[in-house]
Amino acid sequence: MFGYIRPFQAELKVREFESYKAVYCALCRHLGWRYGALSRMTLSYDCTFWLLIAIGLQAKENDCVFCRQRCAVNPLKKCGHMQGQDEAFRFAAALSVLLMGEKIRDDSLDAPHLFGRLRSRFLLLITRRARKKAAADEPELAAMARQMTDAQRAAEQKETPLPDECADPTAKLLQYVFGRAARDETQRRILEEFGYFLGRWVYLMDAGDDFEEDRQKGDFNVFVKKYGPFPPGKLPPEEEKRVATSINELQNMNTARIQAALSLMPLQAFAPVVQNIVCLGLPFTQRSVLFTHTYRKGTKIK
Amino acid sequence: MNDPYRVLGVSPNATDDEIKEAYRALAKKYHPDNYAGSPIADLASEKMKEVNEAYDQITSERKAARKRGNAGPTGGAQQQAYNGYWGGAYQTSTGFGDVRSLIASGRIADAEQILNGVPTDSRNAEWYFLKGTVLYKRGWLDEATNHFSRACQMDPGNPEYRAAFNQITGQRYGQYGGYNPQTDTMNGGCSACDVCSSLMIADCCCECMGGDLIPCC
């Protein structure tokens, strides 16, 4: 579920990209400070995106200070780090750890093989301290995240699960998460709408990405259920195209609502980057996941 | 009121054309069509009003300045209330007046409860349309599409259902953002191979006609 929300780099100015990276690197640093070196592994573009919006709503462009510091993971490299904005970074760090914690917990519950179960157990064990600390820092968020995983499991176990229904828990979680970035009631309404559809988009993108793998392995996938049943073996290209087009159309409806909400957001900083991510980055992910199959999980933006 | 130039995002020295362009871009951005059926539609219409007022103020001020204090009528933006298809422009309401007013006042859960109480065999086109509206507001876009399409099938002549279905179909095909595989602009141009092969083909074509594009081959 991580890493789909990323900028379309070809259209970003170098200055804008530097500021994006500075937020990303600063989040990594905060994660290390708060939850130990291992929690840096949970660093994601999605949490960085939340930060861009949370900071963009309260700080002026001039307040954003970047400072060149040594990278904690690769000490030979120096990169810009954003200074200040501790409150937003604190929340984003907890969010990052808690989301990953829920993902590991979810995996441990439905890992089919002994090896997979052992691996998830092991991960749960070594992340225990960080997860506990994050849950203590953000108890409401931790409760929401847990509720999301449970609601999602329940929705996916139904006889005929609807995509809308399965995407709802993730959407509700992001609705809450983005609502937390609001400074007043009007902003809260806009951000909640924004978060809800972004959550839907993320869930459905993930399902679309895993479609082929889940279909062959026989694992749960809401689109296999919706467009299936499929014969075993390789899908004919026209069938594959039909599914990809339908998923893409569903995603376009989400992007339309996300963009409409973004237009109303009074961003004072990072507006071009956020605009780029929403208007170009999300469609580009749709393209590379569904049509060109060039999306690779976990690839880094250079 | 805010500085009208700041609302439009232009400098006070901007030319009339620049102002018009900025106004058009903003009007497109906050157009009610983008927000029809959305729970934040009221915020968008407020913003639209602000933009309209700012544009009116600037144009009238500039006209006044040109005519030396002889202010003419305000030109440009027309401030008409635009209702979209949910605003009751057509309102072919039959048996669901209460549901419509609940939706209009934002009480989505109550509206849905009433709709769900209607027995399956007496669900008509309007029922499917209203249920679709409720689902759309809640964000269940896939189901909303199914319900709107069902409503259109049951009552093909109804402009209200048709407008809702068209709007959601436009969203599906990427009219309001997103990715459309038919009009792909994200290729980043063509590769060196494409350039070479295109040149070779062009050369062949020229040679067929007796000319030559690349003399060496």
Image (cartoon, rainbow, N blue to C red):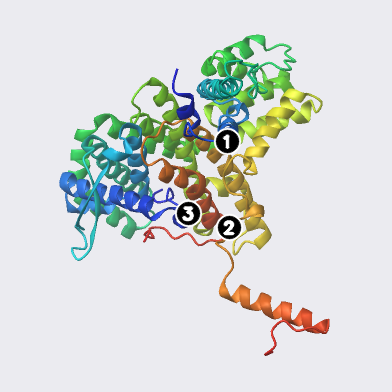
Vertical relation: A294 (above or below) B37:
below
Please identify the residue farthest to the right as the structure is shown: B209
Give the number of the disc on residue A11: 3
Residue placed at 39% from the left, 60% from the top? A299
Query: How dense is the environment of label 1, judged by Cα within 10 Å: few (below 14), some, or many (20 and up)?
Result: few
Q: Of discs 1 and 3, which sits in the foreground?
A: 1
Q: Is residue A287 above or below residue A134?
A: below
Identify whether A120 is placed above or below A34.
below
Q: Position of residue B78 (x, y in %)?
A: 65, 21
Asked if badges 3 and 2 are on one and the same chain, I answer yes
> In terms of sequence position, does the residue under pointer 3 or pointer 2 come before the other?
3
| Amino acid identity at mark 2 | Phe
Pointers 3 and 2 in contact (C-beta within 8 Å): no
Alpha carbon separation for disc pair 3 and 2? 21 Å
Name, please, the residue furthest toward the top. Answer: B98
Q: Is residue B160 visible?
A: yes
Report which residue position mark 1 lands on. B25
What whole-number distance in Å separates the C-alpha atoms at marks 1 and 2? Answer: 31 Å
Q: Are marks 1 and 3 in contact (CB under 8 Å)?
A: no
Q: Residue at x 63, y 9 (%)?
A: B98
Spatial distance from mark 1 to mark 3, Cα to Cα? 20 Å
Number of the label disc, if any, that sits on residue A291:
2
Disc 1 + disc 2, Cβ < 8 Å = no
Can you tell which quarter of the image residue A59 is in?
A: top left
